[in-house]
Image: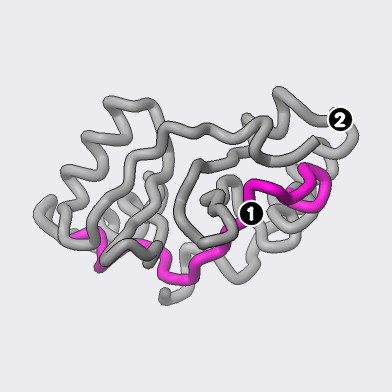
Amino acid sequence: MKIIDIMTRDVHLLSPDQTIHEAASIMADIDAGALPVGENDRLVGMVTDRDIVIRAVAQGKSLDTPVADVMTREMLYCFESDAIDDVARNMAKAQVRRLPVVNRAKRLVGIVSLGDLARNDDPTTIGRTVSRLSTPGGKHDQTTTH
């Protein structure tokens, strides 16, 4: 089975100039915990509810803070044609819970989350993935600068 078979296709793309207030409102409206950020037809980052809390609210930043100031800039992604097991392994290794999905032209076509994996993959694979990405620390630790 491929990622294209399980990914969420309807993805809202933020601009880096949008505010964290707008991002949080959109997340609430669409019941999502992360949104990709794009500029000039390219992915430039990802902002999560945790980014907003740790990098903005906890630091006393204004609701008008641009998403660019708190987003994770390192863009990890997978291809729509990738095998689910390979993506699950990569998510565990990178300790991320969601990945943008791109086509071969590197255009955003969806997003894949742990929830998508859990609903569609072998329970052993998802268990192993959750265990590995739940290990404290890692390159996406919120206590480090981004």
- Amino acid type of the residue tagged 1 in the rendering: Phe
- What number of labels is visible? 2
Point out which mark residue 79 bears: 1
**Element class at badge 2:** loop
Residue 55 falls in image quadrant: bottom left
Q: Residue 19 — which label?
A: none
Mark 2 or 1, nearer chain start: 1
Q: Is residue 105 shown left or right of residue 72?
A: right
Side of 89 relative to 10 (left or right): right
Magenta residues span 66-87
Identify the residue at image location x=60%, y=71%: 139
Q: Is residue 44 above or below residue 81?
A: below
In percent of width and height, residue 3 lies at 68, 41
**Residue at 74% from the left image edge and 42% from the top image edge:** 130
Residue under the image location 63 percent in, 30 percent down: 115
The residue at 56%/63% (across/down) is: 76
Residue density around tag 2, few if under 14, some if 14–19, many if 20 or more, within 10 Å: few
Q: Check residue 122 in the rendering and tell me which mark sits there, or answer none.
A: 2
How many residues crowd mark 1 within 10 Å: few (<14), some (14–19), many (20+)? many
Indicate the position of residue 59 as horizontal and vertical percent values: 25, 63
Secondary structure found at label 1: strand
* Quadrant the N terminus occupies: top right
Spot occupied by residue 36 in the image (x, y as percentages of width and height) = 39, 52
The residues bearing labels 2 and 1 have C-alpha atoms spaced at a distance of 20 Å
Quadrant into which the C terminus falls: bottom left
Kind of residue indicated by mark 2: Asp
Q: Is residue 134 above or below residue 138?
A: above
Judge whether 8 appears above or below 45 on screen: above
Q: Position of residue 82 (x, y in %)?
A: 73, 50
